[in-house]
Amino acid sequence: MITLALSKGRIFEETLPLLAAAGITVLEDPEKSRKLILPTNQPDVRVVLVRATDVPTYVEYGGADLGVTGKDTLIEHGGTGIYQPLDLRIARCRVSVAVRADFDYAQAVRQGARLKVATKYTTIAREFFAAKGVHVDMVKLYGSMELAPLTGLADAIVDLVSTGNTLKANQLVEVERIMDISARLVVNQAALKLKQAPLRRIMDAFASAVNAAEKTPEAA
Ligand code: AMP
């Protein structure tokens, strides 16, 4: 049995065409079913639905043989026990710093300053501001980061930005782009040895599909 860990929403939707390229069809729609284990048209391949932040944990400890998760999640998870063979170039976005439009960010991040930052991405934020020589008081949040500068909880947020519409709707402005993000294929290292042939087949099909999508301009 091959077990693939995915999270609901964008990752699931954007992984479906890659699975199709490997001849795999998921037989149930996670938006309509409460099942956490979804069968596929291949009796020896199943999909497990887990929280995005749990995908690296499932793959690292062998609860899943492979998974799809964002680079942001992998950086925050840390650890070196997960093989990352492929950038799938899906679920693309960026990690950015945002502040209230009336906040003087340039003044706030001068060398040696102190900044109150609210984020779920504490590792990424800490490294970014450390490199700038800015002291950070970190406020760890698990959701709705946009609210923090509006309520005085923080001066700035570090969050994922895609279209920028969420920031705009909350009168926040993106002041720095920290890094570009896309989803990665992650593989359990022991499984890669024990189930080499079926895993290689899926990895190769994903790689070909990613390359084909890159060559098709309208897919970008
Ligand atoms: P947007 O309004 O398009 O800039 O999207 C921003 C919101 O969507 C934020 O709340 C982000 O946390 C979330 N978001 C954007 N891109 C992604 C992604 N690739 N994966 C997960 N969440 C995302």
Image (spheres, rainbow, N blue to C red):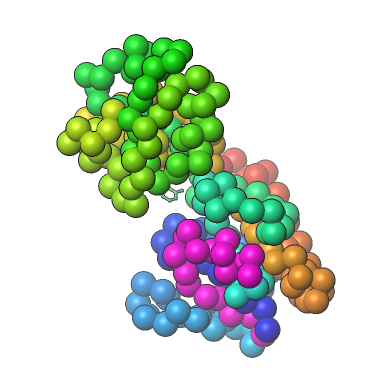
Please state, as top left, top right, bottom left or bottom right, where the C terminus lies in the image.
Answer: top right
Please state, as top left, top right, bottom left or bottom right, where the N terminus lies in the image.
Answer: bottom right
In this view of the protein, which residue sits in the foreground, 159 or 45? 159
In this view of the protein, which residue sits in the foreground, 208 or 218? 208
Expressed as whole percent of the image width and height from the top left, the position of residue 174 reads: 36, 27
Expressed as whole percent of the image width and height from the top left, the position of residue 164 reads: 35, 35
Mark yes or no: residue 201 visible: no
Q: Residue at x 41, y 74 (%)?
A: 30
Q: Is residue 88 left or right of residue 103?
A: right
Q: Is residue 157 left or right of residue 4?
A: left
Q: Residue at x 54, y 83 (%)?
A: 39
Name the residue at the left extreme: 151
Relative vertical location of residue 163 with respect to residue 60 in this rendering, above or below: above
Mark yes or no: residue 67 visible: yes
In this view of the protein, which residue sits in the foreground, 142 or 207? 142
Relative vertical location of residue 155 with respect to residue 29 in this rendering, above or below: above
Q: Residue at x 67, y 78 (%)?
A: 2
Q: Is residue 38 left or right of residue 144?
A: right
Q: How many marks?
A: 0
In this view of the protein, which residue sits in the foreground, 197 or 159? 159
Q: What range is drawn magenta here?
A: 44-61
Q: Residue at x 65, y 44 (%)?
A: 214
Residue 210 included in the magenta stretch of the image: no
Expressed as whole percent of the image width and height from the top left, the position of residue 5 reads: 56, 69
Residue 48 included in the magenta stretch of the image: yes
Expressed as whole percent of the image width and height from the top left, the position of residue 98 reads: 34, 29
